[in-house]
Image: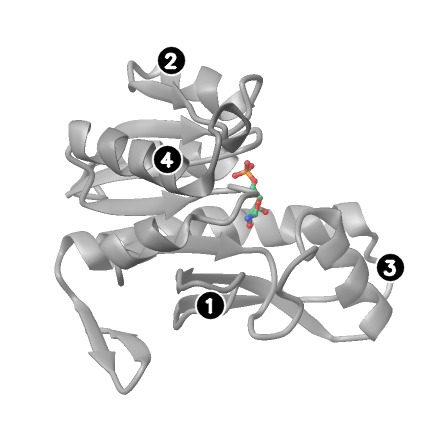
C-alpha cells in the first residue's frame, strides 16, 4: 500500500508511521509527503528519510479547481493508494475526497464526535476538553469526508484527564496514543481488514 502523507506541522505522527514501516509492523510505503507550508518540520522528516516532498499551497492557484487538479495529478504521479492526513490544517478539496472516497484517513487529538470541527485543532482542542470538565480524552482516527472531523471512526483510544492536567500535559498524553493508533489503523487498511457497515467502520 502506497501512502501519501499530508502534513502542515512538525510531523511526529508522520514519523510514527515511518517507524512502524521500518520496524516491519506496517506493510506499506510512504511515496509522498505533501505540505501546504514550505517550512513544515514534516518536510525535513521526509527529506531525511529519502521520501519525495511537495509543497502545494492553494495560494499559488487561481481557483480551487486548478489546485485540486494539481493535487490529483501529484497523487497519481506518486501512485498514492491511501492518503493519511497527519496534522494537515487545510480542508482536502471535495473532488479529491470524491476520488479517494474511503481512502483518506485523519487523526484528531480528542474523542470524536466531541471536540471536533472547524477551529478545533492543536491546543484549542485540549483547552476545550479541560474547560468541559470531561474525565476522558483521547485520539481518533477517522475516514475523511467533506466536513471537518466528521467521517466514520476507525480507531479510538482514551486517556484519563487528571485534575492537574494542563493543555501541555494533556496534549502530550494524547500524542503518545496518537502515535500508537495511527500506524494500527493504517496497518488494518494495508492488510485489508477494514469492514464498512451502514456508514460505520470496523476492523476485522
Ligand atoms: C496531532 O495532534 C494530530 O492529532 C492533529 O495535529 C497534530 C499533528 O502533530 N491532527 P504532528 O505534526 O503529527 O506532530
Instruction: State the separation of the CA atoms marked 4 and 1.
Output: 35 Å
Query: Residue 164: which disc?
Result: 3
Residue 32, image x and y in percent? Answer: 29, 28
Above or below residue 81? Residue 116 is: below
In the rendered view, tell whether residue 151 sits above or below residue 79.
Answer: below
Confirm if mark 2 falls within 8 A of ligand 1.
Answer: no
Q: Earlier in the sequence, mark 2 or mark 3?
A: 2
- Gap between marks 2 and 3 measured at Cα: 39 Å
Question: Residue 66: which numbered mark, if any?
Answer: 4
* Mark 2 closeness class: few <14, some 14–19, many ≥20 residues within 10 Å: few
Distance between mark 4 and mark 3 Cα atoms: 48 Å
- Decide if residue 114 is on the left or right side of residue 127: left
* Above or below, 33 relative to 124: above
Q: CA distance from mark 1 to mark 2?
A: 30 Å
Residue drawn 51% across the image and 29% down it:
36
Q: Which residue is mark 2?
A: 47
Q: Are marks 3 and 1 in contact (CB under 8 Å)?
A: no
Q: Position of residue 145 (x, y in %)?
A: 40, 64
Q: Label 3, label 1: how many angstroms apart (C-alpha)?
A: 24 Å
Q: Quadrant of ligand 1?
A: top right
Q: Give the residue at x 29% y 18%.
A: 52
Q: Residue 57 or 106: which is nearer the viewer?
A: 57
| Residue that mark 1 sits on | 156
Which numbered disc flags the more N-terminal residue, 1 or 2? 2
SS under mark 3: loop
Amino acid at each position: 500500500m502506497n501512502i501519501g502523507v499530508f502534513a502542515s506541522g512538525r510531523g511526529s505522527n508522520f514519523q510514527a508511521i515511518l517507524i512502524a514501516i521500518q520496524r516491519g509492523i506496517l506493510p506499506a510505503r510512504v511515496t509522498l509527503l505533501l505540505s501546504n507550508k514550505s517550512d513544515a518540520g514534516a518536510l525535513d522528516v521526509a527529506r531525511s528519510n529519502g521520501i519525495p516532498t511537495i509543497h502545494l499551497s492553494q495560494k499559488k492557484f487561481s481557483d480551487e479547481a486548478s489546485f485540486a487538479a494539481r493535487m490529483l495529478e501529484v497523487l497519481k504521479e506518486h501512485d498514492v493508494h491511501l492518503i493519511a492526513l497527519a496534522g494537515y490544517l487545510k480542508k482536502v478539496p471535495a473532488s479529491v475526497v470524491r476520488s479517494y472516497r474511503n481512502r483518506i484517513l485523519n487523526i484528531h487529538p480528542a474523542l470524536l464526535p466531541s471536540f471536533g470541527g472547524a477551529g478545533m485543532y492543536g491546543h484549542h482542542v485540549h483547552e476545550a476538553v479541560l474547560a468541559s470538565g470531561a474525565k476522558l480524552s483521547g485520539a481518533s482516527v477517522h475516514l475523511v469526508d467533506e466536513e471537518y472531523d466528521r467521517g466514520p471512526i476507525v480507531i479510538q483510544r482514551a486517556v484519563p484527564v487528571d485534575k492537574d492536567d494542563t493543555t501541555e500535559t494533556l496534549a502530550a498524553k494524547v500524542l503518545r496514543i496518537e502515535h500508537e493508533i495511527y500506524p494500527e489503523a493504517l496497518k488494518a487498511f494495508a492488510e485489508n481488514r477494514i469492514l464498512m457497515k451502514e456508514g460505520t467502520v470496523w476492523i476485522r
